[in-house]
Image (tube, rainbow, N blue to C red):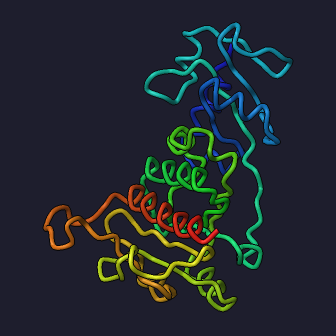
Amino acid sequence: MITKAEIQLVRSLADKRGRNETGLFVAEGAKLVGELRDSRWRIHRLYALEGLFTGSDVTVVTPKEMERLSLLTTPSNTLALVEIPRRTLHPAALADQLVLALDEVQNPGNLGTIIRLADWFGIHEIVCSEGTADCFNPKVIQATMGAILRVAVHYTSLPRFLEEARQQGMPVYGTFLEGENIYQTTLSPNGILVMGNEGRGITPACAAQVSHKLFIPPYPADRRGSESLNVAMATGIACAEFRRRTSATK
């Protein structure tokens, strides 16, 4: 039988403060937890309905107990408390990669989708501003569909990071309404692609470090429709174009 203290611990991890204090985050669902068990990430505690997982680290719970534990609207069949991994950001090591930089992206669903997109397009590093949503938010974890295991997400002073990257000769791309047509401008296989806040776009401090401004045009080009694209959708389009160019040169 699960205790009140266990329920309180899980509930506390819905908030960033609780995650920071404990060094733990919540992952739910048999598929995701199965991937976690096969990875190098360390599971602190694992709760599952009978018959799903075996081992000394598994606490078998009833459907009613899982309802009390789960942070989801529809309770999952498995819930794990996982230690947050420690990662070090080395800008110089990213010089030959395509890297995503997220500037104040605050919607957890958008962040989770972008992490999943990064995984799909072979982007291994995402650098976030300190005001970007926490990648270990339960909603983000669910939206990544396991991609969080393969994409390293870092938090830092983004303007300073971009400045250092430019000093090392890395091109810094960003999406703007006044940018050049992404389909008609030169794109390099490496560099940093900056995506901005859902409502305000890229902040002035980060915009000042962008060396190549890009624009994703509507179709037809003179059509008046939506003012902008959802940041996750725009990220997917931009990443696809960068990777298309890379594939075309091989």
Residue at 74% across, 16% down:
53
Q: Position of residue 112 (x, y in %)?
A: 51, 48
Q: Position of residue 233 (x, y in %)?
A: 39, 56
Q: Nearer the viewer, residue 104 or 21?
A: 104
User: Which residue occupies the extreme bottom position in the image?
Assistant: 167
Residue at 55% across, 64% down:
243
Q: Position of residue 134 (x, y in %)?
A: 56, 54
The reply to whether residue 129 is visible in this rendering is no
User: Which residue occupies the extreme left position in the image?
Assistant: 224
Position of the N terminus by quadrant:
top right
Horizontally, residue 150 falls left or right of residue 29, namely right
The reply to whether residue 184 is visible in this rendering is yes
Q: Position of residue 81 (x, y in %)?
A: 70, 33
Dividing the picture into quadrants, the one containing residue 247 is bottom right
Position of the C terminus by quadrant:
bottom right
Dividing the picture into quadrants, the one containing residue 192 is bottom right
Question: Tag count in the figure?
Answer: 0
